[in-house]
Image (cartoon, rainbow, N blue to C red):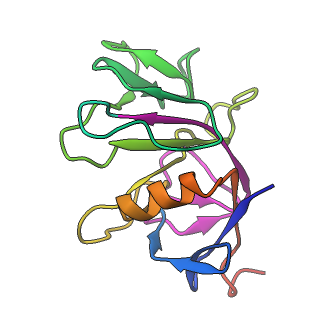
Amino acid sequence: MRCAVLSPEGGLFFGGTRFRAVWGAGGVRRDKREGDGGTPCAFLSLREVLYRADRLAAPRTLAPCRPLVAGEGWCDDPADPAYNQPVALPHPARHEILWREDGLYDVIGVLGWNDVLPVPGRGSAIFLHPAAPDFTPTAGCIALERADLLTLLARGLEAIAVLPPASVP
């Protein structure tokens, strides 16, 4: 399996290359909870790649890949039956809008976190996506330069192992 390693002390490593990356403002967490801003300390499989076809060509990837359409969202409301699943908008419960104008979701690698049988409140929508221009921390996702993200996908990325910070026992 082609796996990248995210080390909070050093970035994202894949195939002997270090990529600049950011993660959740709440740090890397062993006890990930909805809304904590943390990135889960876990092995995260790449489930699917979504992309804005109006902004770029389909990325090369081993993962299933499909274009986003306006009106797609992702439910992050632990009280909703669609928790941690894609939803059509409008959706009555709290959700993220995937069709964004800022470019941060032009390419989305959907990472496998709390998604097989979602446990309400354990965290949702952990994505691999382009970073903000100033590399500000995310709400829990992993983000890097768009070009680097496309390179990782083309090189066959299948998963990310998120390591705990050295200071966490």
Residue at (58% x, 85% y) in the render:
9
- State the count of labels: 0
Q: Position of residue 130 (x, y in %)?
A: 37, 55
Q: Position of residue 47 (x, y in %)?
A: 65, 37
118 lies above or below 12: above
In front: 48, or 98? 48
Picture quadrant where residue 122 is located: top right
60 lies above or below 10: above
In front: 61, or 137? 61
Q: Position of residue 76 (x, y in %)?
A: 48, 32
Residue at (56% x, 24% y) in the render:
85
12 sits to left or right of 74: right
Picture quadrant where residue 165 is located: bottom right
Picture quadrant where residue 83 is located: top right
Is 156 covered by the magenta stretch?
no
37 lies above or below 12: above
70 sits to left or right of 51: left
Q: Which residues are magenta?
A: 25-51
Q: Position of residue 106 (x, y in %)?
A: 33, 42
Q: Please state, as top left, top right, bottom left or bottom right, where the C terminus lies in the image.
A: bottom right
Q: Please state, as top left, top right, bottom left or bottom right, where the N terminus lies in the image.
A: bottom right
- The outermost residue toward the left is 101
43 sits to left or right of 100: right
Is 50 covered by the magenta stretch?
yes
